[in-house]
Image: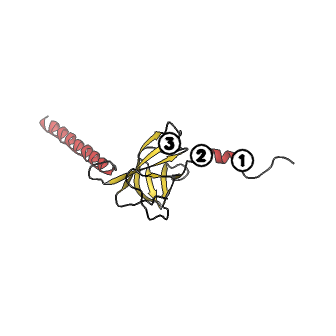
Amino acid sequence: MKSGAVLETLIGLIVLIAAGAFLFYGQGQLDEGPGRAGYTITARFSSIGDLSRGAEVRVAGVPVGTVSGIELDQQTYFARTIFKIRSDVEIPDDSTAKIAMAGLLGGAYVEIEPGGSTEMLPEGGEIEFTQGSVDLFDLIGEAVMGRGSGASTSP
């Protein structure tokens, strides 16, 4: 019976080490994790759709950060989003941020389209030009009903 107890203890130890390794790896992947440099910028959107904390922030399709917070601006009723951007990526202060979908069933992410300014957003800076989330079902409904396309229902 002793060899069975030793085997169970050994398997338990291996499971604990594996769980610890996953936690360590997961913490290292977070932008807020230790050893990860970066800076914070914000943007306000009229609608964020399915965007959530932890979603990617991309420039030209390349991940450069994550959404680190989302809160409601009580005065404008816009969604104030907070992004953690890698320190090696500079964002021009006239850039545009929009919420995009990663495919038909994919999750939402933020796409930043860099502007042409030579001035960069500082820590805590805000992207002024934004485009909120577009509801796919609303677009399909408008296309089916003929609204927004200039189609007329009168003879």
Marks 2/3: CA distance? 16 Å
Of 81 and 4, which appears nearest the observer?
81
Of callouts 2 and 1, the N-terminal one: 2
Q: Nearer the viewer, mark 2 or mark 3?
A: 3
Residues marked 2 and 1 touching at CB (< 8 Å)? no
Q: Which residue is mark 2?
A: 135
Drawn side of residue 54 relative to residue 2, left or right: right
Of callouts 1 and 3, the N-terminal one: 3
Q: Residues within 10 Å of mark 2 (few under 14, many from 20)?
A: few
Identified at 17% across, 38% down, the residue is: 9
The x and y percentages for residue 115 are: 49, 62
Q: Which residue is mark 3?
A: 79
Mark 1, secondary structure of its residue? helix
Residues marked 1 and 3 touching at CB (< 8 Å)? no
The x and y percentages for residue 20 are: 24, 44
Split into 4 quadrants, where in the image is the N terminus?
top left
Q: Residues within 10 Å of mark 3 (few under 14, many from 20)?
A: some
